[in-house]
Structure formats: structure tokens, C-alpha cells
Amino acid sequence: MQKTACTDFTFTVTDKDGQPLKDVAVKVYGEDTKMTDENGTVTFEDVSITADTKIVVTKDGYTTIAQVVGETEECELAVSMEEAPKVCPTFEVDVAKSSYLEGATVIVKDGSETPLKGIVGGKGIVEFENNAVPTLEPETIVEISQEGYEKQTRM
């Protein structure tokens, strides 16, 4: 486990065209989450970054990046974010051979610190808080629960 030679570590986050992204949440495990500035950079001061240090980079509308820093002698790391696939702010829950579970809670965990929460309304349509739009990537976890029913979790 090789440590970097520095105690300040800077992350630069850009879009696929190399343009800096502002207000991106960068989480270094064991440290607080910080936001990038207008130049797409954020610096963590007085940290010990090792080859197996994990980071998570999130921004609404973009695919979350979760990776290990890896071996580096540099005191900075640049990552490029891709726009997330477009999805509707609502989706339907179809319960086979049964009525819709109106009032059921739907939790979408996509790797960000705050999972999305929604409620199943009439006709099985899920409406998320603040009209949030879930990104349903392969590792996204969806939980559906309602009192009197067994909680269902799917990936």
C-alpha cells in the first residue's frame, strides 16, 4: 500500500468534452464530501491517500463514478463524467395478478449518499420527492415496501 508523497489531494472533474463541472460532490472515504468549484476542482487537505482509497463522484444528471484511486505519485486525479441516460421522473410498478400497491414506498439507491424516495400513487405511478429523476443503472438497488407486505429489493 503505497502512500502519495503529499497530504493535499486535488480532484478535477470534467464532462466528456473536457469542460469543468461545478457543484460535483466528491467523497473520499474517511473524509467529508466536498463540492467542486467553477473550475471543476476540489482539494482535500491533510489527507492520506493510498492505492486502495475509494472515491465516489456524483452530480445530478450524470452517471456516478465509484473507483479506487490506485497507485499514484501525483497529488491530483482527473475524472470525466458522462451524462446519465435520460429516464422519466415517474415509472410504473406492475404487480402481477394484483392491484397496485397505492401508498407503497419506493427507495432507489444509486450509489449517491442520499437515496431517492417515492410513493406509489394511483395506477401504479411512482412520484419521487422534488420531482427527482432516478438513474437506473445495472448496480442500482430498488426497494419497495408497504405495511402488511414483505419488502422487495431488486438490483
Image (cartoon, rainbow, N blue to C red):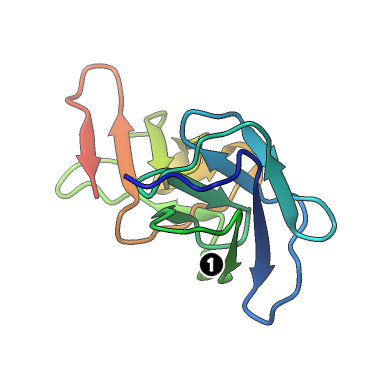
Left or right: 84 in relation to 97: right
Left or right: 100 in relation to 116: left
- Residue 72, given in percent of the width and then of the height, sits at 46, 59
Q: Nearer the viewer, residue 96 or 150?
A: 150
Left or right: 22 in relation to 71: right
Q: Is residue 152 above or below residue 137?
A: above
Give the residue pinned by disc 1: 84
Q: Nearer the viewer, residue 48 or 127?
A: 48
Q: Nearer the viewer, residue 91 or 57?
A: 57
Q: Residue at x 44, y 54 (%)?
A: 69
Residue 14 quadrant: bottom right
Q: Residue at x 14, y 47 (%)?
A: 97
- Residue 113, given in percent of the width and then of the height, sits at 51, 35
**Residue placed furthest toward the front:** 5
Secondary element at tag 1: loop
Left or right: 117 in relation to 151: right
- Residue 131, given in percent of the width and then of the height, sits at 64, 46
From the image, which quarter does the N terminus lie in? Answer: top left
Give the tally of numbered discs.
Answer: 1
Categorize mark 1 by other alpha carbons within 10 Å: few (<14), some (14-19), many (20+).
some
- Residue 142, given in percent of the width and then of the height, sits at 32, 43
**Residue placed furthest toward the bottom:** 17
Residue 53 quadrant: top left
Q: Residue at x 40, y 41 (%)?
A: 109
The three-letter amino acid code for the residue at tag 1 is Ala
Q: Is residue 69 above or below residue 50?
A: below
Q: Is residue 7 above or below residue 97?
A: above
